[in-house]
Amino acid sequence: MSDADKPAEGQVDQPRPEGVHPQGPGLGGTANKGFPSTEGLTGGNRPVEYSNVEGEPADGEVDPEHAPVVRDQRRGMFGSTAGQDTSGYGGLQRTIAFPGAAERPYGGWYDEVVDRLADATGGDLLERVVVHADELTLHVRREDLPVVMRALRDRPDLRFEMCMSVSGVHFPQDVGAELHVAYHLLSITHGGRRLRVEVTAPDSDPHIPSVVGTYPAADWHERETWDMFGVVFDGHPALTRILMPDDWAGHPQRKDYPLGGIPVEYKGGTVPPPDERRSYN
């Protein structure tokens, strides 16, 4: 036993109760017995409850350039998989963060694609390159999107011939970039390589260039993203609603869209809003 581990003079050294985790807010007194000590564990080796309670890493632990991108702070009751305090609302805080920029080398064919794209566009048009869960995402400024997409499709050593989907996301707390659009591309020529291209636009100016001229299959996907999120795809041949009626007000998958209270007509029948339906309780 080292001098640091010895009890102070006059103090009786008490054995630590089995199962007690002394680190982290609210974790003292865990009753589970037989668990090995969690002291000294770092990163992904730490128990899940340590990463879902209030508290951020100390300054300087993460390179700011590659730090996770925080989108929101969520408070509430999240369930037993996100911490052990499920006794009430507001007791836990979770940071909604997305992976930060990756560092070179990215691995696999990712470096090759990024370098060839830079060569094809005459410069680096990428805001950020993210590699997460073995997937490559290229973050692009919206004004550069047509050039990047055309290069990804046409350059022989890239050849992402297919746009599989266009997905919208709304992050109200991401000030100045509340609307995100992700394009999922597939290269058949190069053995099924897949990547994502992501662009953003502010709520105050929700315009993004259409890619239908490059990927005609994106036609209905862009219409759905406009219908659900309100993203205006400039240059789209017929940007009209595809799911909601033409005279519908608002965009239902935005986070600021009201829940309930809206009657829906369906094939001549009327479905009342949730707050007016009959309760069977």
Image (cartoon, grey):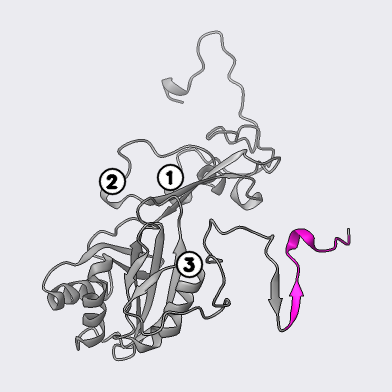
State which mark lies toward you, 1 or 3. 3
Q: Position of 32 compared to 58: left or right? A: right
Query: Which element type, helix, strand or loop, lies under badge 3?
Result: helix
User: Residue placed at 68% from the left, 42% from the top?
Assistant: 32
Nearest the eye: 115 or 169: 169
Q: Identify the residue under disc 3.
A: 229
Is residue 68 inside the magenta stretch? no
Q: Is residue 99 left or right of residue 21?
A: left
**Position of residue 226 measured from the top left corner of the image (x, y, whole percent):** 45, 72
Start and end of the magenta stretch? 268-280
Q: Are marks 1 and 3 in contact (CB under 8 Å)?
A: no
Label 1 secondary element: loop
Image quarter of the C terminus: bottom right
Label at residue 42: 1
Q: Which residue is mark 2?
A: 64
Which of pointers 2 and 3 lies earlier in the amino acid sequence? 2
Q: Amino acid at mark 1?
A: Thr
